[in-house]
Amino acid sequence: MGNNILEEFTKNSRNTAYKFVYEEKVEKVRVFDNWGYEIKPEVAVSLIEGMTNAYINMSQEDMIRLKKQNADNEIEHYIFQNGPSAINSEFRKTLKKDWGFTCKTCKKKVSSKNDTSWWRIYGHYHQSNDKYCSKKCIQLVIDEIQERIKFRIYERFGVENN
Ligand SMILES: [Zn+2]
């Protein structure tokens, strides 16, 4: 059996943002759309029923799945915004003086004389002067940093890490 009020409300509100206002003294939550209109009481009641079906009676399995889904979403956003990401730079051809470094991962000597490009990590919270010889060498470090980010966010969302 479908719920027409819910169906219509969700269909019509695809492009509407809602704000939840908590009235502390009376412990009430009221819902307004982004134009300042409060939702209709019958819509609110239908929403509560629908949300009860979705959340109050949620199985342990679904609870775990939801937490993991939110955590994975957060990880993706975090990495998109803050890195780490690999940056590849070419050695300039017109250098007056050659320069070089030792790859942080494999310890290979890299120089502007013998190589065409080099790698470094860019990231909001991952600045360092370490340099790398190749995509392969930098990827190992990026994977490691991403694992740490994942672990931290899983822990915050209460997701079992395995
Ligand atoms: Zn290397």
Image (cartoon, helix red, strand yellow):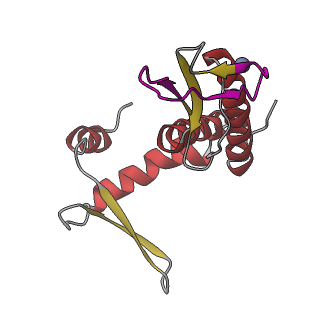
Question: Which residue occupies 52% across, 14% down?
Answer: 116
Overall secondary structure of the magenta section: loop
Question: Which residue occupies 24% across, 45% down?
Answer: 13
x and y percent of residue 16 in the render? 24, 50
Q: Is residue 128 left or right of residue 34?
A: right
Visible residue check, residue 114: yes
Quarter of the image where one finds residue 37: bottom left
x and y percent of residue 115 in the render? 58, 14
The answer to if 100 sits in the magenta stretch is yes
**Relative to the observer, which residue lies in front, 79 or 70?**
79
If the image is split into quadrants, where does the N terminus sit? Answer: top left
The quadrant of the picture showing ligand 1 is top right
Q: Is residue 148 left or right of residue 48?
A: right
Q: Is residue 138 left or right of residue 35?
A: right
Q: Is residue 31 left or right of residue 70?
A: left
Question: Which residue occupies 66% across, 26% down?
Answer: 132
x and y percent of residue 26 in the render? 48, 83
Over which residues does the magenta segment extend?
87-109
x and y percent of residue 113 in the render? 58, 17
The answer to if 76 sits in the magenta stretch is no
